[in-house]
Image (cartoon, rainbow, N blue to C red):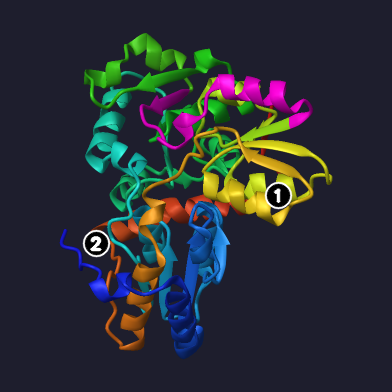
């Protein structure tokens, strides 16, 4: 895919000039523009976002932005693709930097998912429902929808799994969880299943490296995939936080390994982490296992609480950092000139099935809202 290159003139502008001109573009475009910013973005981007949130919240916002002609998504490509699928045909979705991608989304191709469903289906008579993390390509979402499955996020996976195994929901006996094995394993545990209910499917091996007895035994067939940011958190960091801070609450993202989540006080999505910290008592101590931009923002917002990143290395999502002020100004000034650039589109052949999986995710979030999707341990 060919990308337009950011003109050098934007790189030479100061941060103040960039912000001033971005604000001017927003005033000029008015209600025709909506800027969405993921929590892992840097602060100077979030300052210009009309709405900020995690993947679920931003998908909901994209689906209900009926007035905006342009949706500028400050996140990574799979998020912008989801917005393009959920928005109306009259709307244009733009990603400020088309190089902002997600390595995890590349770990589960549509062809591999289709092959997995065939391989696993030949090894059991049970019904298998695919549940695909929203951190996936539009093509992966489409093949999920074609098999009657649903997408999920780290906010609502504890709702989607019961739906998939419910006779009046997905109607499955087993779940193929794609592409994050750790989110799948942690969710299964939170729902009361032991590790023996899980089996790891490796798409690089024949039959995923599984035998028939493995498939028959397992309720959760977990795709071998991960988030490199959340793999940087280790059990010894949890232990060190407790030694150094005494009465500290350790809360981590469910993309962390099972060993880390078992030692933590709680696991939850970025929205759930933010809610937990906001409701905490002044003077409380927190060690948080997720991307460091969100943790730093929480520490600045709640100075009466001790909040630090669980890892001393301050893990950063490098892909999210591809979105910066020069790229944001560039796409906004192009919109003011009525010349949209970096437009994200999804092939028509994928849209209906992918929309089915995404809408199922959004509907499950509403239908199972009485369930608590924060995962306590």
Between residues 353 and 267, which one lies in front from this camera angle?
267
Residue pointed to by mark 2: 347
At numbered mark 1, what does the secondary structure look like: helix, strand or loop?
Answer: helix
* Res 172 seen here: no
Give the side of residue 149 with respect to residue 314, left or right: left
| Residue occupying image coordinates x 34% and y 56% | 77
Left or right: 278 as drawn, with respect to 196: right
Q: To which quarter of the image does residue 186 belong?
A: top right
User: What residue appears at the point 41 percent right and 15 percent down from the top-left corner?
Assistant: 216
Residue drawn at (35%, 65%) of the image: 95
In the rendered view of the protein, which quadrant contains the N terminus?
bottom left
Circle 1 Cα neighbour tier, 10 Å, few/some/many (<14 / 14–19 / ≥20): few
The stretch drawn in magenta includes residue 237: yes
Residue located beneath label 1 in the image: 275
Which tag, 1 or 2, sits closer to the chain's start? 1
- Which residues are the magenta region? 220-248
Residue 373, image quadrant: top right
Is residue 315 in the magenta section?
Answer: no
């Amino acid at each position: 895919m060919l990308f337009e290159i950011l003109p050098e003139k934007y790189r030479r502008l100061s941060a103040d000039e960039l912000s001033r001109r971005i604000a001017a573009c927003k005033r000029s475009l008015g209600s025709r523009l909506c800027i969405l910013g993921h929590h892992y973005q840097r602060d100077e981007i979030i300052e210009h976002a009309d709405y900020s949130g995690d993947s679920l919240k931003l998908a909901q916002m994209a689906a209900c932005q009926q007035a905006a002609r342009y949706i500028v998504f400050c996140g990574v490509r799979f998020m912008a693709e989801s917005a393009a699928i959920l928005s109306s045909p009259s709307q244009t979705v733009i990603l400020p930097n088309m190089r902002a991608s997600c390595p995890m989304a590349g770990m589960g191709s549509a062809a591999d998912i289709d092959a997995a469903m065939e391989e696993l289906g030949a090894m059991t008579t049970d019904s298998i429902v695919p549940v695909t993390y929203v951190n996936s390509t539009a093509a992966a979402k489409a093949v999920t929808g074609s098999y009657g499955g649903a997408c999920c996020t780290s906010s609502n996976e504890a709702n989607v799994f019961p739906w998939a195994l419910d006779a009046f929901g997905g109607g499955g006996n087993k779940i193929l969880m794609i592409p994050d094995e750790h989110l799948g394993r942690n969710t299964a545990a939170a729902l009361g299943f032991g590790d023996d209910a899980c089996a790891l499917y490796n798409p690089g091996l024949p039959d995923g490296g599984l035998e028939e007895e493995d498939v028959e035994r397992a309720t959760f067939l977990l795709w071998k995939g991960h988030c490199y940011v959340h793999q940087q958190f280790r059990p010894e960091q949890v232990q060190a936080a407790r030694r150094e801070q005494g009465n500290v609450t350790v809360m981590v993202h469910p993309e962390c390994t099972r060993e880390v989540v078992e030692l933590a006080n709680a696991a939850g999505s970025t929205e759930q982490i933010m809610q937990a910290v906001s409701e905490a008592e002044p003077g409380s101590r927190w060690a948080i296992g997720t991307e460091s931009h969100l943790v730093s923002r929480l520490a600045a917002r709640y100075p009466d609480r001790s909040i630090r990143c669980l890892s001393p290395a301050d893990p950063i999502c490098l892909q999210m950092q591809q979105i910066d002020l020069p790229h944001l100004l560039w796409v906004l000034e192009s919109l003011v000139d009525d010349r949209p650039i970096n437009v994200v589109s999804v092939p028509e052949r994928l849209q209906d099935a992918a929309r089915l999986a995404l809408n199922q995710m959004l509907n499950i979030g509403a239908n199972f809202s009485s369930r608590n999707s924060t995962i306590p341990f």
